Amino acid sequence: MEKTEIGEKKEKRSSFTGKLGFVLAAAGSAVGLGNIWRFPYLAAKYGGGIFLLTYIVLALTFGFALMIGEIAIGRKTGVSAITAFKKISKKFAFIGWLVSIIPMIILPYYSVIGGWVTKYLFAFVTGNGVTAAADGYFESFIGKTGEPILWLCIFIGATVLIVMLGVEKGIERVSKIMMPVLVVLSLFIAVYGMFMDGAVEGVIYYLKPDFSKFSVMTVVSAMGQLFYSMSLAMGIMITYGSYMKKDVSLEKSVHQIEIFDTGVAFLAGLMIIPAVFAFSGGDEAALGKGPGLMFITLPKVFDSMFGGQVIGALFFLLVLFAALTSSVSLTETVVSILQDKLKINRRILCLIVLAGTVIVGIPSSLGYGVWESFTIFGLQILDFFDFISNSVLMPVAALLTCIFIGYVIKPSFVIDEVELNGKFKLKNLFSVMIKYIAPVCLVVILVSSIFDVTGVLKI
Ligand code: TRP
């Protein structure tokens, strides 16, 4: 299967069926905790409207160019990231290696957060939703030693089981129903939240850009979020592209994935940020709660709602599904990279990934409790992993990918592939972004994020 030549028809490689098949599969991997958990807390922390605006501009320009580039490389070569780079140029094979490390760093801490979601689902299902809404509940939960680790194990255990049993398709099918329900439910929660006392301020904070809040860190965090949320700069989209049929429009698909992914993130922000204002009066400290924001805010919303316990349970169930489709895709990526290289039985590899994730995930989990005083560059362990992957490795991978497309294979490599399905409407935007704008921005971003965290230059 991996032996086909570049651009040759790949009869044996199975592909997504139907025009929407590809979009749904890629969106299933893209939409996850990044949209529902990570986006709102970053938007709250980095100035609301200005973050949202920066994010959207980046998605439409930079995200678009990178996503179309990655998918086109995948579809043209018909192989996954490591092999794709090697196949095109031996000298650049290391980019394939670099991007492969990223999912391995993300999976453990993704599972920690996935564990938190599972715990909240359990709390709501067992009728403890009201307790979960109390002040300090979240902090006391993540501060414990054993319990969060237990939920981490349950989450990654379920993920690996799905991959081992090969029932991903079933999960995907269920999630095709769950996703739209999640969107409708989020819309409902957002509308409900917007009408709470004091929430209007939050709606304004979220929607109206305040340019005085703009800083380099707005761009740094929005860019990191873009990679994370759209699963860019880690080879995933190359792999997805390799399964994409030649008769499906690449440009249209990329637009659809971007709209869907950004839409879900936008809704999550609308659901959480106005509610934060309603419960705290727009207090800065509440906005800067970081990774806990969703877990602290939403149970309070549910608590104030008629039938909130059921709605809360349903909500966390849907979020869990979104998280599972992403963690399954992450696990599969890690397993297949290892399988390619180590040639060990897939099931054994699954167990190795399970053990590895638990071992690396535990410190991230303990970082909020007994290991709280242990920080790296002032970051808690989970935040450190998040920072290394999103603010360092992904920008480096994205920069190398841009240089690779812009100057090694040349934009025409991608353009030809896109034009198999008609005119590439945003061809010029793509070329200019990939060759000039994106590389320059990425260098600036990389330097500023490293300076920021190491404290050399406080921005
Ligand atoms: N995009 C996913 C989310 O928003 C997270 C993610 C990052 C991911 N990289 C991935 C999912 C690779 C699948 C594969 O939650």
Image: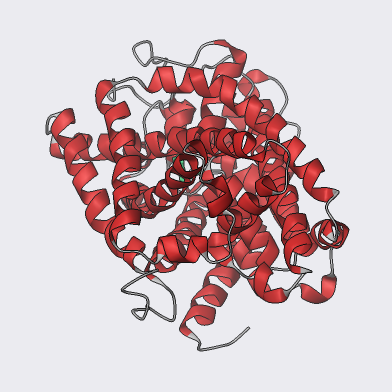
Q: Is residue 395 left or right of residue 1?
A: right
The mark total stands at 0
Q: Quadrant of the N terminus?
A: top left
Q: Is residue 291 left or right of residue 216?
A: left
Q: Residue at x 30, y 28 (%)?
A: 163
Q: Quadrant of the C terminus?
A: bottom right
Instruction: Please provide percent x and percent y for residue 119.
Output: 43, 46
Query: Does 167 appear above or below 146?
Result: above
Q: Residue at x 47, y 22 (%)?
A: 172
Whether residue 151 is visible: yes
Seen from the viewer's position, the closer of residues 284 and 198 is 198
Query: Does 96 appear above or below 220?
Result: above
Instruction: Please provide percent x and percent y for residue 28.
Output: 53, 31
Seen from the viewer's position, the closer of residues 232 and 120 is 120
Q: Residue at x 63, y 70 (%)?
A: 288
Whether residue 255 is visible: no
Instruction: Please provide percent x and percent y for residue 12.
Output: 34, 12
Q: Quadrant of residue 372?
A: bottom left
Its colouring scheme is: secondary structure
Instruction: Please provide percent x and percent y for residue 96.
Output: 35, 46
Q: Residue at x 57, y 32 (%)?
A: 27
